[in-house]
Image: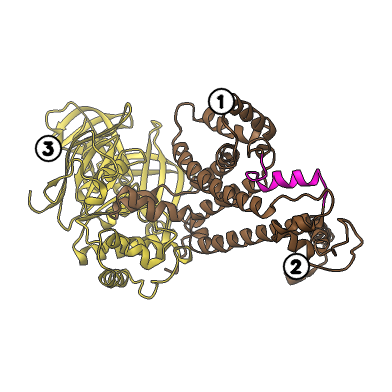
Amino acid sequence: MDGYDVELRNATKRFGDVVAVDDVDLAVKTGEFVSIIGPSGCGKTTTMRMIAGLDQPDSGEIIIRGKPMQGVPPYERNVALVFQSFALFPHLDVLGNVEFGLRMHGVDKTSRRERARRALRTVGLEGFEKRRVGQLSGGQRQRVALARALVVEPALILLDEPLGSLDARLRVDMQSELKSLQQQLGITFIHVSHNQGEALAMADRIVVMNEGRFEQIDPPADIYGSPRTRFVAQFVGTNNIFEGPVAGADGNRLTVSTPAGDLVVAANGAAAGRDRLSFVVRADRVRWLEDGRSADNELPATVLAIEYTGSLSTISLSLPSGELVKMEQHESLLRHRAPRHGETLRVGWDAGDGFVLPDA
Amino acid sequence: MENTTKRFSLSGALFRVYIVLVLIMLYFPFVIMAVLSFQGPRGGHTFPLREVSSWWWWKLFHPGQSTEFSDVGEFLGNYLGALGRSLVLALVVAILSTIMALMAAHAFRKPFRGSNAVFYLWLLGIIVPGITVSLGLFLVLNRLGIIPNWTSSALAVHVMWTLPFCLIIFLMGFNRFDLDLEDAALVYGANPLQAYWYVVLPVLQPFILSSLLFGFTLSLDEFQRSLLLTGTTLETQTLPVMIMASVTTRITPTLYALGTLTTLLSFAVIALYIFFLIRAERKTGEALVEIREPKAEGEA
């Protein structure tokens, strides 16, 4: 199909008895930034290696720019890969690393030097040509790895946990830099990570992967706001999940008998005709009901732990039923009155804050 | 901090004395030998030194003519010929065992059924006493009617001897080898052969050099395994075997001249090794270690 750089069709990969990648479909548009996220061992790295040609699918197809890749080795695919370890060649200097791909493709010396220099300029490493890899910092190695990928003008660039070995501050800087570089050059990026924050910040679309399957493929806002499966709700963001039989309906509002008590939730398409369902309440929708404020669902809850993460605090609460609820509060709201350990608060949320999950 | 580093430390001083003593133990015999090699023509193989001359060196370098000036019972083998054979043999052994060990190390990268057992079988060459290997193969060849020679039977046992050392060196090399490097080469357009030539071999270069050095030196001074397997004539024997033959007849300062010459040659080989190693490590050494645990410095 036109306009797609990569398509996976029913791609499946087994290692012995383990199905690493289980019948997945994906079409990545030209110039799109797609993130594949999931816990370790979910098959995301295998998916990436199959696109690069380092692993072959057992069944199904991988199509790059309209051409089936069955039997095409990695060195004839025109796909670039930025490794987590960067995998820079330690025996070559920066220029030697960047021009490696061009050298293997038989580009003559003058023009490959020229192109390698241009790529280094793009990633902001002008003047580093003669440096040895061992002399570079983590961030600089990252840029060299990126320049090595850009210079071959690939159909797409695969990034395997590209920020995984950088420290926290540098990671945030590189995130925005990667994103703007990708937009500026219009190259298709497929980014693989276990870090949802990275994906939410950079991707046009996110693929959430679990046990070899694609659970959901959607733009970040939908992944975050409307998870399609329980797994996605648990993996992305901080969510509370309640489950139980439907006890009653009042117009658009359903009452669900959960272990935490009867809770009301707004019905959506997924809820129609079901007598048992689970729904998600994001931690940032749970409010602390002080001074007689009210909500559709109100519960007493005891503070178990408070976790400060800069501007947000995540408060773990225990309900009388023993269920746990997480609540995220802005630091500014807690400044005048912070909850204490063991204190019992009144917390709650409205029916509209709940989101019924499509999968049971 | 400066005070603590400059403070006198007894253990440090003792350690330095110890090192100097070891070095004296190592090099004093060599110095004695070098001095005695300049013994006068009528001097013997021990002190005192009677005159200073290059007579015995002249004899070493003129094996054909030295018969005319020989003393009673003096050993008259062609040392230089034996040295040449030893050097050629050592070079061939080094190259062969390095190639074979490199290939074997590739096989050991992924564990296979019985790989542990196979590994220990490979080590047998180190464990078995050399003289039994020599004797065993000698008996087999005798039975088969094959005459031992330095180019055949000695070559075989030498490679058997050096192979385990070289294998261990390469196993160490692959232990530090980042597997992603090969994948990176493939992704960036190198076919498997090019990936091997342009990435794997250069990264392994320090280990290749070490393997060559080990193979060379172990073969060069090997006596037990050569004893029965380099042939029965002086024309096929390697240097250690010939030296053994000469010390059982009569020792002359020519032997000291030879000892001095071979020691200097060894120095030259080691200097060559260090030169190439520094050149290779300058490129790969630090990177090999650091690339696995990149230090993320915020200044990028």
- Do discs 1 and 3 share a chain? no
Residue B237 included in the magenta stretch of the image: yes
Q: Nearer the viewer, residue A267 or B13?
A: B13
User: Looking at the picture, which amino acid does disc 1 mark?
Assistant: Leu
Q: Which hue belongs to chain B?
A: brown
User: Looking at the picture, which amino acid does disc 2 mark?
Assistant: Thr
- At horizontal 31% and vertical 40% (from top left) the residue drawn is A234
Lateral position of residue B43 relative to residue B69, left or right: right
Q: Would you call the spot at circle 3 few (<14 residues within 10 Å), some (14-19), or many (20 or more)? A: few
User: Residue A103, how many percent across, how many down?
Assistant: 29, 62
Image quadrant in which you'd find residue B53 = bottom right
Mark 3 residue element: helix
Q: Is the residue B77 above or below the residue B48 in the image? A: above
User: Residue A140, how many percent across, how many down?
Assistant: 40, 65
Sequence-wise first label, 1 or 2: 2
Q: Which residue is mark 3?
A: A269
Give the magenta-colored segment's residue range.
B233-251
